[in-house]
Image: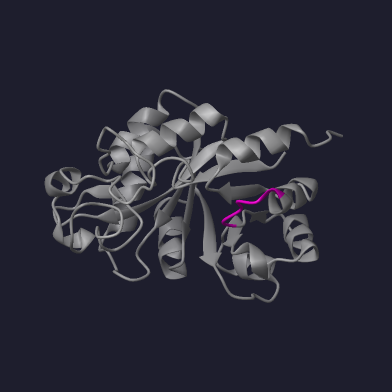
Amino acid sequence: MTIILAHRGASGTKPENTMEAFIAAERAGADGIELDVQLTSDGEIVVIHDTTVDRTTNGSGLVKDFTRTSMQSLKANNHFKHFFKKASKIPTLIEVFDWMKENRCLCNIELKNNIIPYEELEEKVAALIYKYSYEKRIIISSFNHTSLQKMIEICPEVETAPLYNHHLYKPWEYASTIKANGIHPKLKIMTDDLIKTTMEFGIHVRPYTINNRRDMKRLFQLKCSAIITDFPEKAVRLRKLQPHE
């Protein structure tokens, strides 16, 4: 069965990378969530996509220049087009992990260190994974493939997958070369044959970002390892309609 991962939570209907989005994804029946992590100036792991807070909050500036307290004082649903009476806040990874105690969700953590090289981000994330014994519930991805290799060294039990948006020759070989268990490619660069062959070599394929019915149906029919989507509720409904062998 194709696993459904909610991209930044149920970000199509809730403010991205907030607890509201993660809770909505789990309630919709998603198998897991995808989120992005960076470090604050005082070394706390916070969940936010952009290197600045400008787009998604009522603040301005680089994430790395905020303390955890100052980050969490911002309104994290400032960008969201739908009306929300209650202000959302930027969660810490600890808050997400505490919430995961209440459910069985997988969690795909994207290390956002391809632009700003956060020192010890890998070590801090690995330490939390071990603290919560989530080794089998976490997938680590990143556009920084050197960072993935570092993660494999310090936390070998956790699945890893390179993110990429360019054509890659024999992606299963590349994944094996960097000792990754999967790949997270942009969908438009993946043909059906490429998806099937990669999976035949034992490498999980989890394309992003899958939001329309046609693409969802195609990937469900291919029995693709997983999809990463902004609309987990739509994906769950469509998956239920697929024939079972």
Q: Is residue 211 magenta?
A: yes
- Per the image, is 88 magenta? no
Q: Quadrant of the N terminus?
A: top right
In the image, is 152 to the left or to the right of 45?
right
**Quadrant of the rendering where the C terminus is positioned:** top right
Q: Is residue 209 above or below residue 11?
A: below
- Tally of numbered tags: 0
- Front-most of residues 98 and 79: 79
Task: Tell me what residue is drawn at x 75 percent, y 47 percent.
Answer: 217
**Residue 231 appears in which quarter of the rendering?**
top right
Q: Position of residue 143 (x, y in %)?
A: 46, 67
Query: Which contiguous range is marked in magenta?
Result: 208-213
Of 42 and 201, the residue lying toward us: 42
Tell me residue 49's x, y (percent).
36, 56
Give the left or right position of residue 54, taking residue 239 as reference.
left
Above or below, 56 against 172 in this view is: above
- Quadrant position of residue 60: bottom left
Q: Foreground: 57 or 171?
A: 57
Q: Residue at x 37, y 29 (%)?
A: 99
Q: Is residue 50 above or below residue 224?
A: below
Which is nearer the eye, 134 or 34?
A: 34
Q: Is residue 113 left or right of residue 191?
A: left
In this rendering, position of residue 86 left or right of residue 23: left
Residue at image point 45% right, 42% down? 9
State the residue at coordinates (68%, 48%): 225
The structure's colour scheme is one colour
Toward the right, the furthest residue is: 245
Q: Position of residue 189 (x, y in %)?
A: 66, 70
Would you say the magenta stretch is mainly helix, strand or loop?
A: loop
Residue 16 spot, x, y in % from top left: 39, 47
